[in-house]
Amino acid sequence: MVIAYSTKLIPKVSVHVLLLRLYFRNYAWCLDCFKCSSRNHSDLACEDPFHNNYSAAMLESPCMASRKNRNGLFPATACIKLNGVYEETGETMVIRSCALDSGTLTVDTEIVRMSHCGGFYFDDHYVRGCLQSCFEDACNAAVARTTRTTTVFCLFWTLLTTFGVAAILGPRCL
């Protein structure tokens, strides 16, 4: 069975794609992450529990990160939170920042692909702790985010007006 679509559908799809691109231009390209650090409770606003309503100054928008084997900064692909305890002193540490998946094939060199806990060296000191990564705006605050109603409505409207009319009326009316 061959479905024939008229060339009248192409401009309609193009307009909807353009509208979606304009709507999502601030959401699709950059990730916003909280950036702060605290050693032994030196910055209580950065510590857990984290209250993001008091920390607008800590939100970096867009968050930029370095990329392995490249110069410069690039839009981050993940927000991260590193927390732990220094083995020698017992002091605590919390770091909230952003990172970039460099695109290599092995997960062992890309810390953003999975959260993990254990021991590691940080600034020449052994630390026991966890690295957590997430992939939505301001997600390293540990606050649940919900889908925006406008986003769902725009996607539904675009799909309905682009393909719904063609499916209901068939190719004879296009």
Image: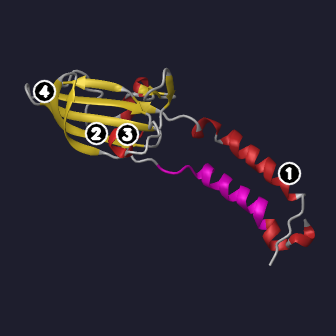
Name the mark on residue 91.
4
Q: Which residue is mark 1?
A: 11
Q: Nearer the viewer, residue 49 or 68?
A: 68
Query: Badge 4, how many Cα within 10 Å: few under 14, some, many 20+?
Result: few
The Cα atoms of the two marked residues, 4 and 2, are separated by 17 Å
Q: Nearer the viewer, mark 3 or mark 4?
A: 3
Q: Which label's residue is closer to the chain start, 4 or 2? A: 4
Query: Badge 2, how many Cα within 10 Å: few under 14, some, many 20+?
Result: some
The kind of secondary structure element at disc 1 is helix
User: What residue span does the magenta drawing correspond to?
Assistant: 146-164
Assess whether mark 4 and mark 3 are in contact (beta carbons under 8 angstroms): no
Q: Nearer the viewer, residue 38 or 101?
A: 101
Magenta-highlighted stretch: main secondary structure? helix
The kind of secondary structure element at disc 3 is loop
Q: Which residue is mark 3?
A: 110
Quadrant of residue 159 within the rendered picture: bottom right
| Quadrant in which the C terminus is drawn | bottom right
Amino acid under label 1?
Pro
The Cα atoms of the two marked residues, 2 and 1, are separated by 47 Å
Q: Which residue is mark 2?
A: 131
The Cα atoms of the two marked residues, 3 and 1, are separated by 41 Å
Task: Residue at 92% x, 72% y: name it.
Answer: 172
